Image: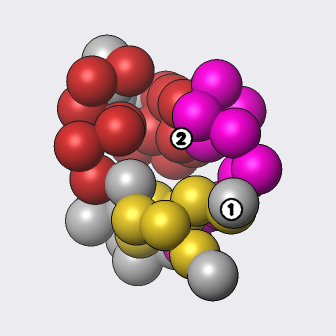
């Protein structure tokens, strides 16, 4: 099942097939785009399942 997170500051939708991939992608996005470090728990708390 795919999962996605909508980045609160910029509205970009980041999706991935696994928790690990989603966490990595969102952490990378937050770091590069916003200079902000997120924990895995913070990413997963925002994650939504995508049918
Ligand atoms: Zn963003």
Answer with left or right where residue 9 lies relative to residue 25: left
Q: Could you tell me which quadrant the N terminus lies in?
A: bottom right
The residues bearing labels 1 and 2 have C-alpha atoms spaced at a distance of 14 Å
- Reading the image, the residue beneath label 1 is 2
Q: Residue at x 23, y 43 (%)?
A: 45
SS at circle 1: strand
Q: Is residue 32 visible?
A: no
- Within 10 Å of the Cα at label 2, are there few (<14), some (14-19), or many (20+) other Cα atoms? many
Residue designated by label 2:
26
Kind of element beneath mark 2: helix
Q: Is residue 28 above or below residue 6?
A: above
Tell me where residue 3 sits by quadrant: bottom right
Q: Residues within 10 Å of mark 1 (few under 14, many from 20)?
A: few
The one of 17 and 8 positioned closer to us in this rendering: 17
Q: Using residue 44 as the reference point, say whether residue 27 is left or right of it.
A: right
The answer to whether residue 42 is magenta is no
Question: Which residue is at a point 70% across and 39% down the rendered structure image?
Answer: 18
Image-quadrant location for residue 15: bottom right
The range drawn in magenta is 13-22
Instruction: Judge: label 1 CB < 8 Å from ligand 1.
Output: no
> Residue 46, image x and y in percent?
28, 53
Does residue 1 appear in the picture of this structure? yes
């Amino acid at each position: 099942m795919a999962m996605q997170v909508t980045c609160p500051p910029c509205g970009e939708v980041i999706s991935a097939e696994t928790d690990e991939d989603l966490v990595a992608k969102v952490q990378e996005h937050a770091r590069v785009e916003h200079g902000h470090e997120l924990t895995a728990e913070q990413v997963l708390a925002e994650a939504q399942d995508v049918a």
